Structure formats: C-alpha cells, structure tokens
Image (tube, rainbow, N blue to C red):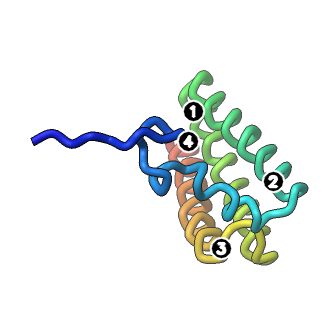
Amino acid sequence: MTTSTVPSRSGGVPRWSTPTHRWPSLLGRASRPALIAQTGALVGFGTLAVGSLYLAPTVGLVLSGLVLAGHGVWDLWHYRRDRVVPRSLAEFCMLLDVPLGVGFLVLAALG
C-alpha cells in the first residue's frame, strides 16, 4: 500500500510538525531586548562550554563548572522576573545547573 503526499509549500511536511509554525507564538511572549539577551547568553555560555573541551582536563572541568553555575544564576534571574521562560523551566535548570556545576568544581579540586 502506497500513500501519496499532497504537495504543499513545505515540501509535503505537515505544517503542524514544523518548528516555524510555533515560532510566532513563542517569540510573541518575549520582547526584543529579552531576545537579544537570550541570544547573547546562548552564544556566551555555548562558546565557553565548547571552549572548555579544548583545554587541559582539569582546567576544562573548572570552566565547565563555572559556566554551569553561572547559567544557574541566569536561571535565577529568569525565575525571579517570571519572564521569557516559564518559572518551572527556570527552576528546573537552576536546580540542575548549580549542583552539577558545584560537582564539577569539587571533582576538579579532588582530581
């Protein structure tokens, strides 16, 4: 049994399955300055995280721990303001990033 796809502008992919279908509703919640800050944080945290892979193991572990703990502070800011991301997401990230970052720092100190 063969099925055919109805031609569409998205190349036969259902519109509901594409992320661009949901972007306006996601972006409509945040202001332009908030999006610029989020983009800057993405580039900054991402660059530091990837950069830590190219360092000596202990130094990279310390940098990764600091980046994770820093991201936890970033999440605390979002949690308190209750903007850009839902509070539950900020709370989850905070409670994941800070202990993990501290754990990385402890491992670097012990290792």
Q: Which residue is mark 2?
A: 35
Tell me the quarter of the image containing the N terminus.
Answer: top left
Residue 92: name its quadrant.
Answer: bottom right
Q: Which residue is mark 4?
A: 108
User: Residue shown at 81%/53% (left/top)?
Assistant: 35
Which of the labelled discs sits on residue 58, or is there none? 1
Check disc 3: other Cα within 10 Å, few if <14, some if 14-19, many if 20+: few
For marks 3 and 2, the one nearer the N-term is 2
Q: Are marks 4 and 3 in contact (CB under 8 Å)?
A: no
Which of the labelled discs sits on residue 85, or is there none? none
Residue 27: name its quadrant.
Answer: bottom right
Question: Which one is in front, 62 or 86?
Answer: 86
Q: Position of residue 39 (x, y in %)?
A: 77, 45
For marks 4 and 3, the one nearer the N-term is 3
* Amino acid at circle 4: Ala
23 relative position to 58: left or right: right
Q: Which residue is mark 3?
A: 86
Task: Name the front one of labels 1 and 3.
Answer: 3
Check disc 1: other Cα within 10 Å, few if <14, some if 14-19, many if 20+: some
Between the C-alphas of marks 3 and 2, the distance is 15 Å
User: Residue shown at 90%/56% (left/top)?
Assistant: 33
Q: Are marks 4 and 1 in contact (CB under 8 Å)?
A: yes
Disc 1 secondary structure class: helix
Disc 2 secondary structure class: helix
